[in-house]
Amino acid sequence: MSQNLKFLIILSTIFLAIDFYTWQGVKLLTQGWSDKGKLILKLVYWGYTGLNLLFFMSWRMGWLQFPHLVLRMVTAIFGMLLFAKLFWCVFLLMDDLIRLGKWVGSLFQGAPENVLDSGVEKSKGISRLRFLSYLGFGVGSTFFGTSLYGIARGAHNYKVRKRDLFIIGLPESFEGLKLVQISDIHTGSFWDRKAVSRGIDMIANLKADMVFFTGDLVNDLAEELHGWKELYSKIKAPLGVYSILGNHDYGDYHPWPDHTSNKPPQADKSHMSPMQLKNLEKLKESHAEIGWDLLLDEHRIIEKNGHQIAVLGVENWSSKARFPKYGNLKSAYAGAEHIPVKLLLSHDPSHWREEVVNQYSDIKATFSGHTHGMQFGIDSKFYRWSPVKYMYPQWIDLYTENEQHLYVNRGFGYLGFPGRMGVYPEITLFTLRGK
């Protein structure tokens, strides 16, 4: 038996167990239904489960090929329903644990009670069981409804966030300069071109002096850009559009047919197969075709009215072991030492704390992305929270230490879940201010 088939059997068993447990709650809440209604519900419920398993196995085993959009939407809805069921199961489990505890306690009292049955017909457990079932159903339904809203409305709910960025030693000629940052486009995830086009128009209409794109133009493949380059080329700026690569741009997560190395990602890219390297070169060329200046451990000197600032850009560099360290800030910095104000593009915000703050005090501002704010959380001016904060202390918005700034953009696109819940896509408009 292949490893893939073993994996499918184990995963399918888990899914069936969750569905069976949830079904107990469904039966409880539909006790008053007619026999015909119960039969129809049963056929729909288990028919949906069967279709899901068939779809999942056909996809994983390569029996059928599905259009990218169909695959993304089906898996998204499946995942949303799975989590909704899990929420419901938590409440059902609470009642089971309570009844189990009562039964164990009764054993020590010498008079075991019949508390392990459902208690549907009688006993005081009826009201508690019904209450927890309704509560679990309500929580699960709320999660599912919120997720649908996150896809339908949140995915392309673009927000322009305006920030004054105060920089010590900013040359007078750059006072008031308008700088736009976007990040994490993830082209291969888009499912509504019209909405994305509206977001690109919002960027273009800001008429920025300079634009930064801080990585992850694609999910894996350069071919994702087919049909999108012309749209992205609408992003222009008189002082230039500067871009870098993010962790997804290297194709490290794609199963390349000619991949033979078992090595983890290497800084010199020696682990990459010929097909992966070709894909990477094609992506680099695409940046130029769009009209963006891709910085690969390089810098550019920006001159205005005789004054200069330096824009540095590094390849992906992360302090997290699971993400690659391709970048070399020392190389990007070399030759720009004499420029008093340096702005850095680095995809992963962990780079700032690990290397920039400790070793490069004259890099006044670092612009990052990567986290997406997890596409889920609370994001208000009064309170911000997302599970991703426990992995990345600097996970969205502005951070300052010793007059050095880090801005973590929330991202323009989405990955995995095709939507956003609470943390919406961002276009950042900075106004540079001297200090």
Image: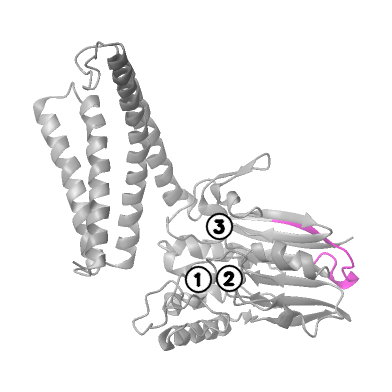
Which residue sits at x=23%, y=70%? 62
Q: Are marks 1 and 2 in contact (CB under 8 Å)?
A: yes
SS state under label 3: helix
Q: Are marks 1 and 3 in contact (CB under 8 Å)?
A: no
Taking the image as shown, residue 287 lies to the left or right of residue 117, namely right
Q: Residue 215 shows which numbered tag?
A: 2
Q: Quadrant of residue 355?
A: bottom right
Q: Amino acid at mark 2?
A: Gly
SS state under label 2: loop
Taking the image as shown, residue 332 lies to the left or right of residue 116, namely right
Q: Are marks 3 and 2 in contact (CB under 8 Å)?
A: no
Which residue sits at x=26%, y=36%? 22
* Residue lying farthest to the left in this orientation: 36
Question: Where does the magenta region start and end?
Answer: 162-178
The reply to whether residue 238 is in sight is no
Q: Is residue 174 magenta?
A: yes
SS state under label 1: helix
Q: Amino acid at mark 1?
A: His
Q: Quadrant of residue 410?
A: bottom right
Q: CA distance from mark 3 to mark 2?
A: 12 Å
What residue is pinned by disc 3? 372
Q: Amino acid at mark 3?
A: His
Q: Nearer the viewer, residue 427 or 346?
A: 346
Percent coordinates x, y for residue 146 in the rendering: 43, 41
Q: CA distance from mark 1 to mark 2?
A: 8 Å
Q: Residue 248 shows which numbered tag?
A: 1
